């Protein structure tokens, strides 16, 4: 059941409660760059043994970011693939928008995506396999609702279980504690309105909060409307209309040593596209409509320090329920036989879960121990549908239920233990072992549609249950000085097969290409072993981080041929091994104010180089992004009333020697160099304006994360369809009262 009526009521009531009597100045949201994913504790990035990073709400706002990819555009080793509807020339399963996140060459379901500690839905393939052409993706949130984005760039299954074999990204949402501060008192009101040229978009965000210490609450509403993203090229992208709403309400009750917080979180996105680029001689015209919806309700409670419990200094518990749905309707007016084909595809996930964590610190003869332990358990109900209606030239209709997989229940249970041990002279060594035991079970339900299609040909849905899997991790950090440390880490990652991979079923019975994708009862888990060595420094006016990494993957799930040649039977199997290695660097320097006199200058650099290959064949991995290096210089006036930032990004090329042609037809891309300029001006105590110009030199370039997904039946009709925008900009007007 949708929660719009409840949310609307809460929005109206909250607005009047919070907005009453606003007269005092309210500062912008200020969030300290901490991380909670690397060790499941709030620690600064400098204190963690790994290449984890934090992007704050302020940084997102400075970029005028409307999606996750724009928010993380300068982050080394990270990319967010963006698909444009209609890149499959015959059957446009591919949805418009962001799919998932790639971290150091690994993406899709191999990256754990979480929002406030809650798993986001899995990607799926409407074609029944593990190919990149199916599914509308895993991004079910608006960055305007986030207080920070945390990224852990290595296997983190010991902390967050299956799906975290390649890394973890977690969004933390705004709430009373981030808007009102630790005192949870006062009022906060902020409204911003933005326009941008990249997709003729408009965006309005309202934030309001009020607190009296004991009870506090907040509400955030983000509305977006726009069209297709512009490209710098010889063709335009398919016409598209987009609209989205995101509403977040939090109510918090605080006492002396504990607090509880309830959250209602609703996200809805609707798109409609006319796929001009694939009409050609196969279709007269094609239209595509899609939607992503997510409703979440959660309640958490936390006991803080001072409770004097024997087994814990602090503990927290969260109960949640989340429903997500992805739907698409594709209409093709076909040249052949003058037919009209309607495809309706949906993928729904209902998840109920419980998360518990306790923290306990104690001293030993060799030092101090910060123990963190707990468990996570969830039940997911996953189902999909694929309905095809053919309207023939005589007006008659043929209806087919082409179900893509058997619906199923998925059970996940995990117990974790982390012990951060500070030892040695002056507590200069930090040894952190971590361990997780997890259990995963899939219980399919063979409904009538699946029985009719799959079982009639002798294939049945498979049950899956792994033995209790251990996912260990170990890191060692040595503080050479209070400002300088070196570290090394090892993490073992595990990913259980998704429900779609286990029980995906797809028929493609045409004269020139007959094949069936069927379930595999012997499908097993994927694993990874990640190693990292690094050095990092953090002083009063500068910092840097240098890391070398190698990640080994085994049991990659991919399609293989079971039988042929008249009718090819394909099935997902654990057939792949991969190796990825690379180097990552970042640094920031704040100028001596005596040199500038009138303000401060901040400069920074970041870069990531990596390479990867499929071990058995020696083929390069198409998920590896080319070298990316970024540099910037930012100036802030002494009065703190205005500032500006100039950023430069260089991306290396991707030639044929680095591209595998085993699937699809990805095209090589050239190197690129792009300049971005942003700035802000505080007009008075209540009003500020912010803006930016991107790709100042109007460069014609491509991102490999986007173009590498070219393929499908006949590839991209025109490669420029995937080009990046030319010069574009945004402007935002913000009111604080």
Image (cartoon, grey):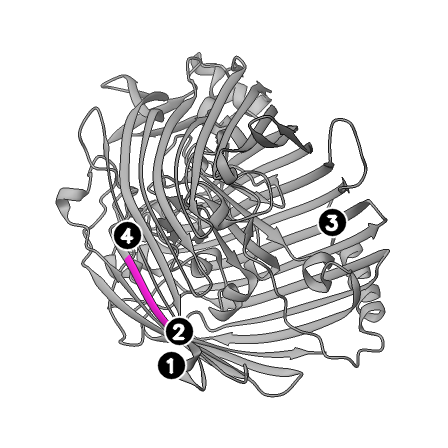
Mark 3 and mark 4 lie on one chain; the one further toward the N terminus is 3
Whether residue 670 is visible, yes or no, is yes
Crowding at dot 2, Cα within 10 Å, few <14 / some 14-19 / many 20+, comes out as some
Q: Position of residue 165 (x, y in %)?
A: 43, 32
Q: Which residue lies furthest to the left in this view?
A: 657
Residue sitting at x 61%, y 54%: 268
**Cα–Cα span, label 3 and label 2:** 42 Å
The residue where tag 2 is placed is 591
Q: Is mark 2 on a helix, strand or loop?
A: loop
Vertical arrangement, residue 297 with respect to residue 9, above or below: above
The residue where tag 4 is placed is 704
Is mark 2 in CB contact (under 8 Å) with mark 1? yes
**Cα–Cα span, label 3 and label 4:** 38 Å
Q: Residue 595 got which mark?
A: 1
Q: Is the magenta stretch mostly helix, strand or loop?
A: strand
Q: What element carries label 4?
A: helix
The N terminus, quarter of image: top right
Mark 2 and mark 4 lie on one chain; the one further toward the N terminus is 2
The residue where tag 3 is placed is 263
Q: Is mark 3 on a helix, strand or loop?
A: strand
**Cα–Cα span, label 1 and label 3:** 48 Å
Vertical arrangement, residue 519 with respect to residue 431, above or below: above
**Cα–Cα span, label 2 and label 1:** 7 Å
In the image, 541 versus 295, the foreground residue is 541
Mark 4 and mark 1 lie on one chain; the one further toward the N terminus is 1
| Stretch of the chain drawn in magenta | 629-633
Vertical arrangement, residue 76 with respect to residue 643, above or below: above
Q: Position of residue 119 (x, y in %)?
A: 58, 38
Q: What element carries label 1?
A: helix
């Amino acid at each position: 059941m949708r929660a719009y009526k409840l949310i609307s009521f809460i929005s109206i009531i909250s607005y009047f409660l919070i907005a009453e009597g606003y007269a005092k100045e309210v500062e912008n949201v200020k969030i300290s760059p901490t991380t909670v994913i690397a060790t499941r504790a709030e620690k600064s990035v400098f204190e963690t043994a790994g290449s984890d990073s934090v992007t704050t709400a302020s940084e997102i706002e400075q970029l005028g970011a409307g999606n996750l990819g724009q928010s993380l555009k300068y982050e080394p080793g990270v990319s967010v693939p963006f698909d444009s509807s209609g890149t499959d020339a015959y059957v446009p399963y591919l949805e418009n928008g962001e799919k998932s996140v790639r971290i150091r060459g690994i993406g899709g379901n191999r990256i754990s995506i979480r929002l406030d500690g809650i798993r986001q839905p899995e990607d799926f393939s409407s074609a029944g396999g593990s190919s990149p052409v199916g599914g509308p993706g895993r991004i079910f949130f608006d960055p305007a609702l986030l207080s920070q984005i945390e990224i852990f760039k290595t296997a983190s299954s010991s902390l967050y279980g299956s799906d975290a074999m390649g890394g973890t990204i977690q969004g933390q949402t705004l709430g009373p504690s981030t808007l009102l501060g630790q005192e949870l008192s006062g009022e906060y009101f902020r409204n911003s309105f933005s326009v941008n040229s990249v997709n003729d978009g408009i965006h309005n965000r309202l934030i309001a909060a009020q607190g009296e210490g004991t009870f506090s609450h907040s509400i955030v509403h983000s509305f977006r409307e726009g069209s297709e993203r512009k490209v710098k090229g010889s063709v335009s992208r398919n016409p598209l209309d987009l609209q989205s709403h995101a509403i977040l309400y939090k109510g918090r009750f605080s006492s002396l040593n504990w607090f509880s917080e309830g959250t209602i979180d609703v996200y809805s996105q609707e798109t409609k596209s006319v796929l001009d680029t694939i009409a050609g001689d196969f279709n007269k015209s094609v239209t595509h409509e899609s939607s992503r919806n997510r409703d979440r309700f959660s309640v958490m409670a936390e006991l803080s320090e001072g409770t004097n419990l024997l087994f814990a200094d602090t503990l927290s518990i969260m109960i949640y329920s989340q429903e997500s749905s992805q739907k698409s309707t594709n209409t093709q007016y076909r040249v052949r036989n003058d037919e009209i084909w309607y495809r309706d595809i949906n993928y729904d996930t209902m998840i109920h879960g419980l998360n518990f964590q306790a923290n306990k610190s104690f001293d030993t003869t060799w030092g101090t121990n910060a123990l963190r332990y707990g468990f996570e358990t969830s039940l997911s109900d996953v189902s999909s549908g694929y309905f095809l209606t053919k309207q023939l030239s005589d007006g008659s209709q043929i209806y087919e239920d082409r179900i893509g997989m058997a619906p199923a229940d998925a059970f996940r249970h995990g117990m974790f233990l982390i012990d951060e041990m500070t030892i040695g002279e002056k507590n200069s060594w930090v040894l952190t072992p971590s361990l997780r035991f997890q259990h995963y079970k899939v219980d399919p339900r063979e409904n009538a549609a699946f029985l009719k299609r799959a079982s009639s040909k002798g294939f049945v849905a498979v049950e899956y249950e792994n033995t209790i899997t251990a996912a260990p991790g170990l890191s060692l950090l040595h503080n050479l000085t209070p400002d300088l440390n070196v570290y090394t880490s090892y993490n073992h990652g595990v990913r259980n097969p998704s429900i779609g991979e286990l029980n995906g079923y797809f028929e493609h019975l045409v004269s020139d290409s007959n094949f069936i994708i069927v379930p595999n009862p012997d499908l097993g888990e994927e694993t990874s072993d990640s190693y990292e060595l690094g050095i990092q420094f953090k002083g009063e006016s500068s910092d840097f981080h240098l890391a070398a990494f190698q990640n080994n993957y085994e049991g990659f799930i991919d399609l293989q041929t079971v039988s042929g040649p008249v009718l090819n039977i394909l099935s997902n199997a654990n057939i792949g091994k991969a190796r990825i290695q690379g180097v990552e660097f970042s640094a920031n320097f704040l100028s001596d104010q005596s040199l500038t006199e009138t303000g401060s200058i901040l400069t920074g650099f970041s870069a990531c180089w990596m390479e990867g290959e499929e071990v058995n064949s020696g083929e390069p991995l198409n998920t590896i992004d080319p070298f990316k290096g970024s540099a910037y210089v930012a100036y802030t006036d002494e009065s703190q009333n205005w500032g500006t930032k100039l950023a430069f990004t260089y991306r290396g090329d991707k030639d044929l020697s680095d591209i595998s042609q085993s699937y699809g037809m990805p095209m090589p891309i050239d190197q690129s160099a792009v300049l971005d300029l942003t700035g802000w001006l505080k007009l008075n105590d209540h009003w500020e304006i912010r803006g930016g110009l991107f790709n100042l030199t109007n460069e014609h370039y491509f991102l490999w994360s986007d173009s590498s997904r070219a393929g499908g039946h006949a590839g991209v009709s025109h490669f420029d369809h995937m080009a990046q925008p030319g010069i574009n900009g945004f402007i935002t007007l913000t009111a604080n009262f």
